[in-house]
Image (tube, rainbow, N blue to C red):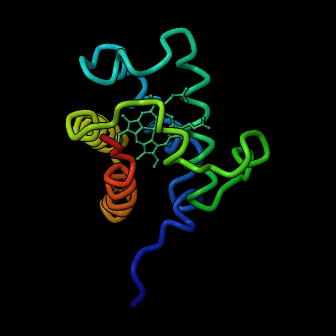
Amino acid sequence: MSEPSIDDLYHRIGEAKLRQVVAAFYRQVPSNPVLGPMYPPDDLAAAEERLYGFLAQRFGGPTTYSEQRGHPRLRMRHAPFAVDVTARDHWIATMGAAIDEAELPVIDSETMKHFLFSVAHQMQNR
Ligand code: HEM
């Protein structure tokens, strides 16, 4: 048995579920005391679309993200933001709640969390 892969996660859960996760995350951002001030208040819908596009591509779906944004280079793109331990933990808690809300099959929610939380550690830059 091979480990569950993120490479076909998009096709396992489908576009609607992935959009639901990302929407649930961004719905919580404005009222979060740490994340709220970091994100562009009048560009949240576009930010939501960027994260959705990146994840869809990373999980084996359409490659629209790179067609529009180029190579993800996530460390570099996060450099302007002070991602310290507190911000990282708020991001992880918020995303964890968003994933739980979507009520995915446990194997898929755990696979998604494992990937996202490990990248969150890599984004810490302060
Ligand atoms: C560790 C805590 C994190 C914080 C505080 C954080 C914060 C931010 C902020 C403030 C933005 C700018 C919003 C925008 O205008 O798009 C952003 C963009 C983005 N973040 Fe994060 N982020 C974190 C972790 C992650 C993780 C784990 C991923 C992916 C697995 C991720 C993927 C992205 C993507 C794809 C963008 C848009 C990049 C672009 O094309 O410009 N972030 N993040």
**Picture quadrant of residue 27:** top left
Is the C terminus in the top left, top right, bottom left or bottom right quadrant? top left
Residue 8 in picture, x, y percent from top left: 57, 66
Q: Is residue 25 left or right of residue 72?
A: left
Q: Is residue 46 left or right of residue 37?
A: right
Residue 76 in picture, x, y percent from top left: 54, 44
Q: Which residue extends farthest top?
A: 42
Q: Residue visible at 55% across and 9% down?
A: 42
Question: Observer-nearest residue: 119 or 106?
Answer: 119
Question: Observer-nearest residue: 83 or 48?
Answer: 83
Count of all numbered marks drawn on residues in the image: 0
Question: Observer-nearest residue: 52 or 75?
Answer: 75
Q: Residue visible at 39% across and 90% down?
A: 1
Q: Residue visible at 37% across and 54% down?
A: 122
Residue 99 in picture, x, y percent from top left: 34, 44
Q: Which residue extends farthest bottom?
A: 1
Question: Observer-nearest residue: 102 or 3?
Answer: 3
Q: Which residue extends farthest front?
A: 126
